[in-house]
Image: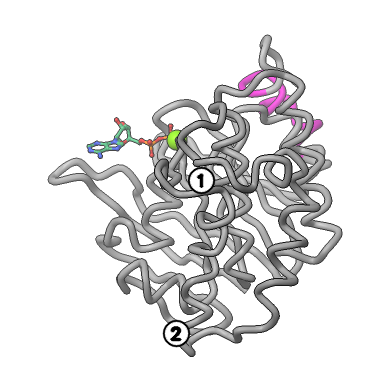
Amino acid sequence: MLSIQNLQAAYGKVEVLHGISLDVPKGKLVTLIGSNGAGKTTTMRAISGMIRPKAGTVTLDGRDITGMDSHRIARAGLAHSPEGRRVFATMSVTDNLLLGAFPRFTGARPKGDVQHDLERAMDLFPRLKERRNQLAGTLSGGEQQMLAMARAVMLNPEVVLLDEPSMGLAPILVDEVFRIITRLKQQGVTMLLVEQFAQAALNVADYGYVLENGSISLHGPANRLRNDPKVVAAYLGGAHAH
Ligand SMILES: Nc1ncnc2c1ncn2[C@@H]1O[C@H](COP(=O)(O)OP(=O)(O)O)[C@@H](O)[C@H]1O
Ligand SMILES: [Mg+2]
């Protein structure tokens, strides 16, 4: 579904990704784990067109989307829920969600039943349903993060990139985010997940990649990575195990 080959990315002269390859098969949940600064967010940005890769290829459903601008990539069916809270503060929750579906109104994506998908998103995120008429800027940080996730789902995408959806959330909301990810997976949504809670990510994922200083050092089925001594020592041992 989503396939990345030898992807390189840089900020100015500083190369951050040194040629990484990974695959996200249809219907699967793949997680990318790694320390702070390893290049996880840069990987997501280079896939979704927020930055232009220096080299390598990104294909979505067999189509080369490398270096396209982010709007075209969204229309091709790739949704990106970026790190941090990127919502439109002065618009209502409902309008933020409808904006997520915007590329579906341009004729480039199957339009489907947007109203139905809006209801489905509200069911998946009950906190947003209760606050559907509230301005997004008045939501708590955690709720804004959920709104960013829900908006990505409103594209009815082929693939969703989730960059640290639980960042900064209270533990009870972290659990809710992982429940939602599990439900999306049950609905057959293809996802690439970056998470600080590597243990929780490997528990829900089918497959995992470990990114170290801009290179993939290890990859394999999630249940194998979970028990790999190197992974346990580096990413699962500490206080962040969930
Ligand atoms: N906008 C930017 N400009 C310059 N350097 C950046 C920028 N964003 C990230 N970096 C650098 O790129 C490296 C990888 O960062 P990032 O992809 O955010 O890592 P991660 O998401 O794994 O924590 C870090 O060294 C970081 O300082
Ligand atoms: Mg990051």
Q: Residue 201 in magenta?
A: no
Looking at this view, is 215 or 101 the one in front? 101
Question: Between tags 1 and 2, which lies in front?
Answer: 2
Looking at this view, is 51 or 157 the one in front? 157
Look at the magenta stretch and give its main secondary structure: helix
* Secondary structure type for disc 1: strand
Q: Position of residue 213 (x, y in %)?
A: 40, 35
Q: Quadrant of ligand 2?
A: top left
In the displayed image of the protein, which residue is found farthest to the front? 133
Q: Are marks 1 and 2 in contact (CB under 8 Å)?
A: no
- Residue 157 vs residue 36: left or right? right
Amino acid type, label 1: Ile
The circle on residue 106 is 2
**In this picture, is 178 found above or below 160?**
above
- Residue 93 vs residue 59: left or right? right
Q: Position of residue 9 (x, y in %)?
A: 29, 53
Q: Position of residue 216 (x, y in %)?
A: 51, 45
Region of the chain picked out in magenta, as a range: 225-235
Q: Residue 232 in magenta?
A: yes
In the displayed image of the protein, which residue is found farthest to the top? 239
Amino acid type, label 2: Thr
- Residue 49 vs residue 60: left or right? left
Q: Residue at x 45, y 26 (%)?
A: 36
- Residue 36 vs residue 227: left or right? left
**In this picture, is 196 found above or below 237?**
below
Q: Residue at x 75, y 71 (%)?
A: 116
Q: Residue at x 58, y 55 (%)?
A: 94
The N terminus appears in which quarter of the rendering?
bottom right
* Residue bearing mark 1: 216
